[in-house]
Amino acid sequence: MSALGLAAVVLQVFFFIVLARVIMSWIPLITNKPLDYSNPIVKFLIDVTEPLLAPMRRYLTIGMIDLSPMVLLIGLSILQSILLRSA
């Protein structure tokens, strides 16, 4: 596997991690229970995604709607597509 192929796989894994974080954020709305931030899975998802989401959140939050995960997912998809074409 080439370095570009490996980078594309890493981007795909990160895409699913961000997607899991988005789904995780909906759990309190569905269950009416607060999210358990001491849970290791929750902590992992937040720790891994927050370094990229936090800077984008400053500019992409409109009222109560946070668009940063959607923009990050689109950006990851575009970057992965570019890498796969180059490989």
Image: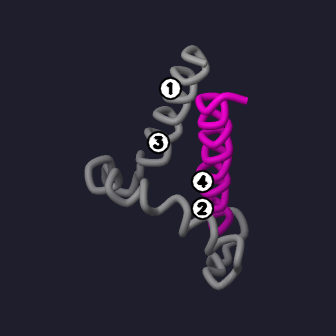
Disc 2 from disc 4: Cα separation:
5 Å
Camera-nearest residue between 9 and 3: 3
Label 4 near label 1: C-beta < 8 Å? no
Q: Which residue is mark 2?
A: 25
Q: Which residue is mark 3?
A: 72
Gap in angstroms between the C-alphas marked 2 and 3? 16 Å
**Cα–Cα span, label 2 and label 1:** 24 Å
Q: Earlier in the sequence, mark 2 or mark 3?
A: 2
Image quadrant holding the N terminus, namely top right
Query: In front: mark 3 or mark 1?
Result: 1
Q: Secondary structure at mark 3?
A: helix
Q: Nearer the viewer, mark 3 or mark 4?
A: 3
Residue 46 percent location from the top left of the image: 55, 67
Q: Is residue 43 above or below residue 13?
A: below
Would residue 51 be found to the left or right of residue 9 on screen?
Answer: left
Judge depth for marks 2 and 3 and give the one in front: 3
Q: Residues within 10 Å of mark 1 (few under 14, many from 20)?
A: few
Name the residue carrying label 4. Answer: 22
Magenta span: 1-29
Q: Depth check: give the residue in front, 22 or 50.
A: 50
- Which residue is pictured at 52% across the width and 58% down the height? 49
- Amino acid carrying label 1: it is Ile
Other residues around mark 4 within 10 Å, as few (<14) / some (14–19) / many (≥20) = some
Give whichever of discs 1 and 4 has the lower sequence position.
Answer: 4
Q: Which circle marks residue 78 in the picture?
A: 1
